[in-house]
Image (cartoon, grey):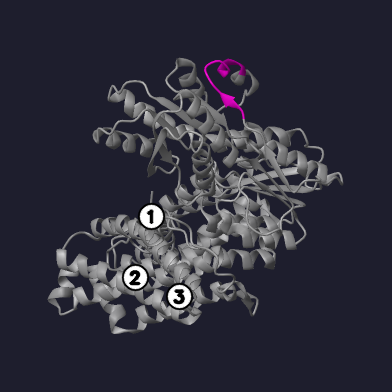
Amino acid sequence: MSRLLNRMNTLQTVQRYQGLVGLLLLFIAAFFLSKDFFTSDNWVNVLKQVAIPGTLAIGMTFVILTGGIDLSVGSHLALINVIVAAWLKHGTGLGETIAYSLFIATTIGAFIGWIIGATKLQPFIVTLAAMVTLRGIAYVYSNRTMISGFEDKLGGFQQSYFQLPVSGWILIFTTILSGVLLARSIFGRHVYAIGGNQEASRLSGVPVNKTRIAVYALNGLCVGLAAVLFTARTNNGAPSAGLGYELDAIAAVVVGGSSLVGGIGNVFGTFLGALFIVCINNVLQLGGVDTNIAQGWKGLIILLAVYMQNLGRQ
Amino acid sequence: MNMRSKIGFIGAGLALALAGCNGSSSGTATAGGGNATAANNSSLPLVAFSQANSQDPWRQVFDKDTKAEAAKYTSDMQFEEQEAEDDVNKQVGVIDTFMVKKPKVLLVSPVTEAVQTEVEKAHDAGEFVILLDRSVPGTKWDVYVGGDNMAIGRQAGDQMGKLLNGKGTVLMIRGTADAKPTKDRGNGFMESMKKFPGIKVIVGDDCGYQRGKAQTFMENFLQQKQPFDAVYAHNDEMAIGAYQAMKAANTPKKVIIGIDGCQKEMIEHIKNGDIDATFMYPDPGPKGVDIADDFLKGKKPTDKNIFLPTEMVTKDTADAYEKEHPNLAG
């Protein structure tokens, strides 16, 4: 009996920190593939690259913890991207533009959460519809062209403070705040409860619909943040931006140890998961490995991660 | 298998998978079909190439030709290539990562003009920056090599006017709305149309340079029963898509003109008389690699903008064209 418990503990520990385990293995691989991986230049570079998918993945973690999914984040990012670009081009101040676009992003998220509760449709279907709709709105809003010509108004996001890029700091703060919210607040407990068993939580008095709206709103806020960082990075607004980003975000959450069924996982794991995925790309490129071969490895690793999540949980 | 051995098995698998990457890089180099050609001699200067995407047929030929050219200079340079899946954000990441390796020459085929800041960063870091196919605003780059889409659009217009004897209706199927080649291929064509007041142009939808989208668009267009005499598509894939839709609907033969001339399939259609003409969109890769090699030997080109000429392919010239371009996509 105690041996069995022991095994379960080892398994749970590995599951909990599988992002970290993956990263460690990757570091070993990097040691053979490319020494450039370990330079500080490259680490600033990696943090810049992880900021956008990482922020999206943090938002996605909330959604996945409730047992939901959001397929619309890529299109949502494109819409906020063109809004930010259009407002800056129009001459609106930086602060107002950011506040306004984050507000819109949060509202869109809340609206999606509300629809899921009101229609009782699966999140997969609702967010699939949102994915198509938001992409269409992004094209119409931008008049089907790219929006550029707002100089370097968002240049501040590309600078570094204390050795780290601003975008990296934003991801780190978002992760810590989200982690505290999930672990220390009643709201956080509700999120885990809904993901564990929605019906049981409803019967025991958890405000399921309100919590869901808040979760999708937080996810929307994360999309808004990511979109601002995206605009800063590309310095323009493109209605075709962010294609397929929802899958990167979901992959980061899963590799980070969250269960797609809901109720299990945390944002620190997601952070490591996102970092892991960006590092794979980075290591393989530095090592001169073919991009499409890299995609194959990524798929294999995600499959392994999900398999590990399911061990001992049937 | 008990739990612990399962974990061990997975861990070993993961480690193997990651370690395996090392071996696969040399595999790609010899296979030649991949994106990265890792040379073994790391003391040679690095020439890094950031490709916008490696998916569409024109880019595949572009990749193949570029690699073949780089293979001629293995004693002068290490050549590496990465694609960015047509995503600006990914391309910025690719270039940032290349910069860690401090290449002497950076070849960039921009996804959009939005990589300007990143291109400037590389230029400021002292890298010799060669832009391929698409340019970026500003002057902080060294050489641009590409085709002249305006000129191609004009020539396509001239040919259209000739084939229609200056009279009729042309449906223009457009590429990605927010891309510069789309604007140039459209504007060049419209410029030429001024010479043919008897020709009316219907501006069709943005079909994203994709065959499937153009096919669907054409199917819907045919449902409207609007009379037309010709199709001008901003690339061959869309021309083929439109042709397939018309063929399925038993539409009588229309004049069809495409652009790119990089696929065997298109050349076959031209030989069969299904499609009337295409204009080669020149592949800037080999020229870019030549310039990179010249630079490594201390020679810089005198022109900052190098425009490669186009070539019209019709039924009469199709055979010769195919012989001249052995690397056409399948």
Crowdedness of circle 2 by 10 Å Cα count: few (<14), some, many (20+)?
many
Q: Residue at x 60, y 48 (%)?
A: B19
Q: Position of residue A250 (x, y in %)?
A: 39, 59
Which is nearer the N-term, disc 3 or disc 1? 3
What residue sits right under mark 2 in the picture? Answer: A62
What residue sits right under mark 3 in the picture? Answer: A175
Which is nearer the N-term, disc 3 or disc 2? 2
- What amino acid does circle 3 point to? Thr
Bounds of the magenta span?
A: B311-320
Decide if residue B261 is in sight here.
no
What residue sits right under mark 1 in the picture? Answer: A306
- What amino acid does circle 2 point to? Phe
Left/right of residue A295 with respect to residue A39 in the rendered view:
left
Q: CA distance from mark 1 to mark 2?
A: 18 Å
Q: Residue furthest front?
A: B197
Q: CA distance from mark 3 to mark 1?
A: 22 Å
Please name whichever residue, A227 or B185, is drawn nearer the observer in this view of the structure.
B185
Compared to residue A248, the image places residue A196 above or below, namely: below
